Amino acid sequence: MATLWRVDDKGTQEFMNDFYVASKNEASKAEAVRKAQLSMINSQYSHPYYWAPFILIGNGF
């Protein structure tokens, strides 16, 4: 996991919590990122500044 720009601490905490919850229940890391992004879009952190900078590096499976 990496970011494309500096990120907000609280937004990152929310994103990573959602990511780890989803990664426990999903088949791939890519799907966990997708679910975390969707969760952020439906929260107070809906602006792309908070959820768009996160990318997977390497094997996302």
Image (cartoon, grey):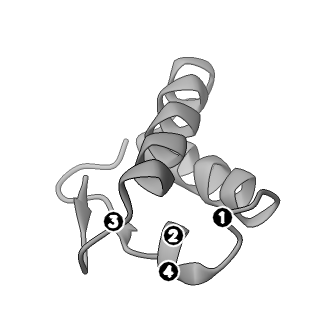
| Disc 4 and disc 2 in contact, CB within 8 angstroms | yes
Mark toward the start of the polypeptide (2 vs 3): 2
Residue 3 higher or lower than 28, as above or below: below
Residue 27 higher or lower than 56, as above or below: above
The 10 Å Cα crowd at callout 1, few under 14, some 14 to 19, many 20 or more, is: some
The label nearer to you, 1 versus 3, is 1
The 10 Å Cα crowd at callout 3, few under 14, some 14 to 19, many 20 or more, is: some
How far apart are the alpha carbons under marks 2 and 3? 12 Å
- Which disc number belongs to residue 50? 2
Circle 4 is placed at which residue position? Answer: 49
Q: Place residue 53 in its image quadrant.
A: bottom left
Amino acid type, label 4:
Tyr
Position in image of residue 41 (x %, y %): 74, 66
Circle 1 is placed at which residue position? Answer: 45
Residue shown at the point (65%, 80%) measured from the top left? 47
- Secondary element type, mark 4: helix
Residue shown at the point (67%, 57%) measured from the top left? 40
Mark toward the start of the polypeptide (1 vs 3): 1
Q: Nearer the viewer, residue 21 or 40?
A: 40
How far apart are the alpha carbons under marks 2 and 1? 6 Å
Circle 3 is placed at which residue position? Answer: 55
How far apart are the alpha carbons under marks 1 and 4? 8 Å
Q: Nearer the viewer, residue 61 or 44?
A: 44
| Disc 2 and disc 1 in contact, CB within 8 angstroms | yes
Amino acid type, label 3:
Ile
Q: Nearer the viewer, residue 44 or 25?
A: 44
Mark toward the start of the polypeptide (2 vs 1): 1
- Residue 15 placement, left or right of 12: right
How far apart are the alpha carbons under marks 3 and 4? 13 Å
